[in-house]
């Protein structure tokens, strides 16, 4: 259970103040005196996005308020981190290359401090304009927007700070596996095939991933771990094809370890009966 009373949620602010974190912020202005620290996005791991399903990586951060502001009056301020790629000023102006948190809730620590937790909503759908190009599979930078509000609800001032922290967005990968024959005489060859594909954010489909090194792994029925038998390179269509000598009953699978733009993937294991 979280300590401290809940002070503010972004979902509430959207209605009360006309503020939406789905839109990019405007130009930089004066110092608000608000401090945002200890930002953690997706527990420090890369964010993996496919072609259709929205992903919701978590975010947490701390807020410290200056004199004149109090967590007892959350309508007087807002503060939230966001991620962007490329030039921040361009991302702000166009709304492209910018992703803000979908919703978060802040819990009062004391009158000047709050702990905030929530999540990003990253949707590959065309309308969101978040990952509509494969160039978005890259290192995103982190920044923070802080705003002070008038009693009437109008914007008083706003401030932006860039941070050295980065977040990697990766294209999701898929892989299949098949082994033939499924029943084989000991010492004979089996053929293991499959296909490696990855999300194409430009087409919203999965396409063959060519020229990738993948590992064929094997686990005997009486063993507890897999071992790598050999490595192969995927074809121009992402196909994987190799042979192995059947020595005992066991399981075969493909493993792709990923790279800076594409996530790792391990297939299910297929069983081969050796007689």
Image (tube, rainbow, N blue to C red):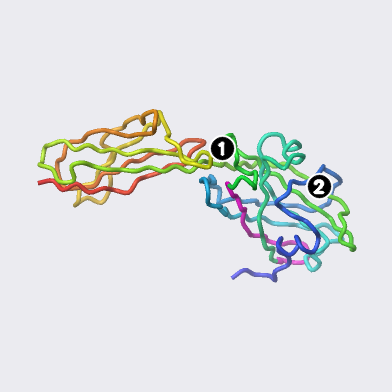
Residue 138 x, y percent position in the rendering? 58, 36
Mark 1 element type? loop
Residue 19 x, y percent position in the rendering? 77, 56
Classify 89 as above or below 42. Answer: above
Tell me if 273 is positioned left or right of 100 in this view: left
Q: How many marks?
A: 2
For the residue pair 121 and 199, the one nearer the viewer reads as 199
| Numbered range of the magenta stretch | 108-124
Q: Which residue is mark 1?
A: 202
Residue at coordinates 81% horizontally, 53% vertically from top-left? 147
Mark 2 element type? strand
For the residue pair 221 and 237, the one nearer the viewer reads as 237
* Residue 190 lies in quadrant: top left
Residue 6 x, y percent position in the rendering? 70, 69
Which quadrant, please, contains the N terminus?
bottom right
Q: Which residue is mark 2?
A: 159
Residue 131 x, y percent position in the rendering? 60, 42
Q: CA distance from mark 1 to mark 2?
A: 33 Å
The disc label shown at residue 275, or none: none
For the residue pair 121 and 79, the one nearer the viewer reads as 121
Classify 211 as above or below 24. Answer: above
């Amino acid at each position: 259970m979280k300590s401290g009373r809940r002070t503010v949620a972004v979902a509430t602010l959207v209605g009360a103040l006309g503020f939406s974190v789905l839109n990019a912020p405007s130009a930089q202005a004066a110092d608000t005196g608000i401090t945002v620290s200890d930002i953690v996005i997706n527990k420090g791991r890369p964010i993996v996005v496919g072609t259709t399903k929205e992903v919701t990586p978590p975010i947490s951060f701390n807020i410290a308020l200056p004199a004149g502001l109090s967590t007892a009056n959350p309508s007087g301020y807002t503060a939230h981190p966001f991620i962007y790629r490329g030039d921040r000023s361009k991302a702000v102006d166009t709304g492209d290359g910018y992703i803000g948190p979908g919703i978060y809730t802040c819990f009062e620590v004391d009158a000047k401090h709050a702990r905030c937790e929530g999540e990003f909503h990253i949707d590959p759908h065309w309308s969101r304009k978040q990952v509509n190009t494969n160039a978005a599979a890259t290192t995103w930078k982190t920044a923070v927007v802080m705003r002070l509000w008038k009693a009437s609800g109008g914007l008083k001032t706003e401030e932006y700070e860039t941070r050295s922290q980065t977040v990697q967005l990766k294209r999701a990968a898929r892989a299949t596996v098949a082994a033939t024959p499924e029943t084989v005489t000991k010492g004979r060859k089996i053929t293991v095939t499959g296909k490696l594909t990855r999300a194409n954010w430009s087409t919203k489909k999965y396409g063959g991933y060519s020229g990738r090194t993948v590992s064929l792994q094997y686990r005997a029925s009486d063993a507890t771990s897999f071992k790598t038998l050999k490595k192969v390179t995927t074809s121009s269509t992402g196909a994987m094809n190799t042979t192995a000598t059947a020595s005992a009953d066991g399981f075969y699978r493909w493993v792709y370890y990923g790279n800076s733009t594409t996530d790792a993937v391990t297939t299910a294991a297929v069983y081969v009966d050796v007689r």
